[in-house]
Image: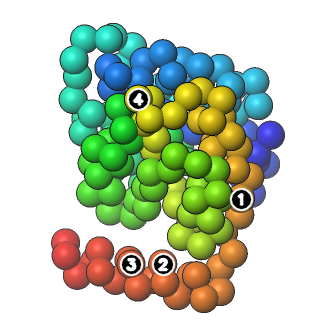
Amino acid sequence: MEERRTNRMMKIGIGNDHAAVDMKNEVVEFLKEKGYEVVNFGTDKKESSNYPEYGRKVAEAVAAGEVDLGILICGTGVGISLAANKVKGIRAVVCSEPYSAKLSRQHNNTNVLAFGARVIGIELAKMIIEEWLNAEFMGGRHQDRIDMITEIENENE
């Protein structure tokens, strides 16, 4: 179980559109079994919905510190991550394999993970999530690059 410096359970916000209801439900159960607290910002309906709404909700919760990290799922993971990345302070990454998820945390200190329910299966999703959650930001030269990204973000407010 992952814990924050405050010695409390890590809280993960999850968001999804209609294409990812089933996968979201399985991911929620997986996270709860691992001891994470999960806040559902996604839809539970399979009727067409708009992924930007859910990407934004999770990203705003992460940026505000209401949750520690976010996980987003839509058909491909791309659209929902684009919406999340429009929120200041969010570094969302789309991953379809575990190695990029791990390095995104180690090098880019990503705070939102996205993937596609139409792209990967649940077992691969679990592996991606595990690698992402277990990785730690390495700091150093990587922090310098994060600072550069933040500078670009601030210049374009």
Give residue 112's position: percent from left, percent from top: 48, 50
State the SS at label 1.
loop
Q: Which residue is mark 3?
A: 149
Mark 4 and 1 residues: CB-CB less than 8 Å, in contact?
Answer: no
What's the CA distance linking mark 4 and mark 3? 30 Å
State the SS at label 4.
loop
Q: Is residue 41 visible?
A: no
Mark 2 and 3 residues: CB-CB less than 8 Å, in contact?
Answer: yes
Q: Identify the disc placed on residue 58.
A: none
Q: Which residue is mark 4?
A: 118
Q: In the rendered image, which quarter contains the N terminus?
A: top right
Q: Is residue 104 visible?
A: yes
Decide which of tag 3 and tag 1 comes sooner along the chain.
1
Counting the numbered discs, the total is 4
Q: What amino acid type should be assigned to the residue bearing mark 4? A: Arg
State the SS at label 3.
helix
Q: Which residue is mark 2?
A: 146
Decide which of tag 4 and tag 1 comes sooner along the chain.
4
Give residue 130's position: percent from left, percent from top: 70, 43
Q: Nearer the viewer, mark 4 or mark 3?
A: 4
Decide which of tag 4 and tag 3 comes sooner along the chain.
4
Q: In the rendered image, which quarter contains the C terminus?
A: bottom left
Q: Identify the disc placed on residue 135.
A: 1
